[in-house]
Amino acid sequence: MASIRTRPFGSTRRPVPLVGQGTWRADEADRNTVLAALRRGLDLGLTHIDTAEMYGSGEAERIVAEAIAGRRDEVFLVSKVLPHHASLRGTVSACEQSLARLKTDRLDGYLLHWRGAPALAETIEAFASLQRAGKILSWGVSNFDVDDLDELVALGAGLPSCNQVLYHIAERAIEHAVLPWCARRDVAVVAYTPFGVSAQLYEGRSKAARVLAEVARAHEATPRQVALAFLLRHPNTFVIPKAASPEHVAENAAAAALELDDEDIARLEAAFPRGEARALPTL
């Protein structure tokens, strides 16, 4: 396994690679390609693998199980519980089913995918129970805005290890409040869909795309690598781009070593403005 830049993952303090591997829609792609990508990622040190019971109704977890077979101890493995399963008993049951699909006895992180009808206190109580049983080593949340995070803290059950949110160079809403809130409390911010959904950012002719390409050329990097490095400029952020192919995984891995200077960051911030403060976006 290659060495890659890491930083402590929130309150867990575990060293986790800045760049990980996401598996959303992995079940919709060619299975052998996805398996090859995940395994190549592990070889390159991208040991943070993120999945969820929602992805392909558990099929993504089964794919991950196959990819990490014989290598479980290398992996910082994260899955997520759907909000409609997030009652006290439902969370425990969902976790046990995820463990079975992943063919492992524990998760390094287990997240509430987003807020739902079950009381948040029930979900956190279930997380604590799973942690005492050794079935999860840490718990966190996803798609939580500041008011959700404040409500969580008010329960007195401690802080989440991370908040997984939509964040990419053209979608910077979390920088207004969510990112600072997490930074002050040592909560890791994990960016999902860190490339956004528009290829025009990387292949188009807009002024912003041209700036991105110019910064990339100056560093002998690709625009996508610069886009990831821009997010990773914050000391508590991590990214989990989708493991689409072995070639894309290798490109993603190289972004962990790319450090932008102040001039680069200023140019990118001007080209991709943060915009007005608003509610946390989701896909």
Image: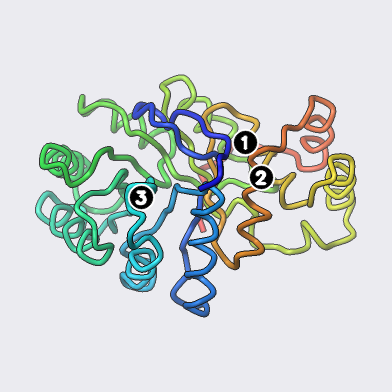
Q: Are marks 1 and 2 in contact (CB under 8 Å)?
A: yes
Residue 105 appears left or right of 22: left
Mark 1: give few (<14), some (14-19) or many (20+) Cα within 10 Å: many
Give the residue type that dot 1 points to: Leu
Q: Nearer the viewer, residue 141 or 254?
A: 254
Cα separation between marks 2 and 3: 21 Å
Give the residue type that dot 3 points to: Leu
Residue under the point 35% across and 33% down: 161
For label 3, the residue is 77
Picture quadrant of residue 216: top right
Residue 181 sits above or below residue 252 on the image: above
Residue 246 badge: none
Residue 231 appears left or right of 20: right
Give the residue type that dot 2 points to: Leu
Helix, strand or loop at label 3? It is strand
Residue under the point 54% across and 62% down: 243
Cα separation between marks 1 and 3: 20 Å
